[in-house]
Amino acid sequence: MIKIENLHASVDGKEILKGINLTIGAGEVHAIMGPNGSGKSTLSNIIAGRDGYTVTSGSITYKGKNLLEMSPEQRSWEGIFLAFQYPVEIPGVNNTYLLKAGVNARRKHHGEQELDAMEFLQLVREKAKLVELDPSFLSRGVNEGFSGGEKKRNEIFQMAVLEPSLALLDETDSGLDIDALRIVAGGVNKLRSSDRSIVMVTHYQRLLDYIVPDVVHVLADGKILKTGGKELALELEERGYDWVRQEAAA
Ligand SMILES: Nc1ncnc2c1ncn2[C@@H]1O[C@H](COP(=O)(O)OP(=O)(O)OP(=O)(O)O)[C@@H](O)[C@H]1O
């Protein structure tokens, strides 16, 4: 699905990513863990095409294409989705309207017929059930006045509607209460499929009890220092990150 090779990137002249190598196959779920400020969100944002980052060297190949040459819109149409660490409020823009515009722009890009209002309403109602999102949220402004947890749930609802090939979930567990975490994780699990890859950025092993990853990476100081299976997350929870740094240095 995606292959990142020796990616170096900076913000305001400061190097944040210092040689990332990462390959994610179709259908795989990868978790990225790591200390604060290590570059996890930076990596997700660069994949999604957010402004403000300078890729100084390296490459990202997505479905065989040079991702770095694609606009953020093209990336979205080609199936890249980012669930934000801090979802933004867009007052006055209806939640359903935004999604309809997104889905239809992608369908148009692929030469498919756009969904009409009725077809789309049916789709969003069905997807809202997946994350137990109250239908009243469909007609509200995007994240406008939503609680922290409601915003996170709305992100996964958006993912369900947009049906991405590569979903990047940046700390989707933060702000969710115990029940909401279970529901949202259940929704993500239902969205797992052989033609969809998921990257979860998280600080806590807890999320990975619900969404069991195929691979766990430790990103520290702008590099992936260690890669392992789901048991690596348990070890990190117990031992922290210093031993990973020491091991990598050795
Ligand atoms: N626009 C910016 N201007 C200056 N520094 C930035 C900017 N964006 C990111 N950084 C810096 O880049 C580094 C990596 O940030 P990033 O958000 O990617 O870390 P993270 O691993 O996601 O952290 P956390 O776990 O705390 O969310 C941090 O030191 C941060 O301050």
Image: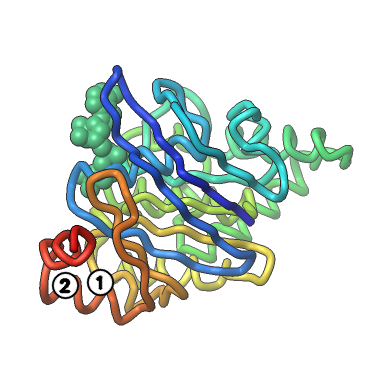
Left or right placement of residue 121 versus residue 199 in this view:
right
Q: Is residue 147 visible?
A: no
Task: Give 63 or 210, whichever is nearer the viewer.
Answer: 63
Rendering coords of residue 241 (x, y %): 15, 62
Query: What numbered label is drawn on residue 239?
Result: none
State how far apart marks 2 and 1 are (Cα): 7 Å
Rendering coords of residue 27 (x, y %): 61, 69
**What kind of element bears circle 2?**
helix
Q: Is residue 62 visible?
A: yes
Q: Residue at x 38, y 78 (%)?
A: 229
Task: Give 166 or 62, whichever is nearer the viewer.
Answer: 62
Rendering coords of residue 2 (x, y %): 59, 52
Q: Amino acid at mark 1?
A: Gln
In this figure, which residue is indicated by the disc labeled 2?
Answer: 237
In this figure, which residue is indicated by the disc labeled 1?
Answer: 205
* Above or below, 110 relative to 159: above
Q: Residue at x 46, y 35 (%)?
A: 46
> Label 1 CB, ligand 1: below 8 Å?
no
Q: Which quadrant of the picture is home to ligand 1?
A: top left
Q: Residue at x 40, y 59 (%)?
A: 200
Left or right placement of residue 108 versus residue 240 in this view:
right
**Colouring of the image:** rainbow
Q: Amino acid at mark 2?
A: Glu
- Circle 1 packing at 10 Å, graded few (<14), some (14-19), many (20+), is many
Callout 2 touching callout 1 (CB < 8 Å): yes
Task: Give 177 or 31, whichever is nearer the viewer.
Answer: 31
Task: Nearest to the eye among marks 2 and 1: give it.
Answer: 2
Between discs 2 and 1, the one toward the N terminus:
1
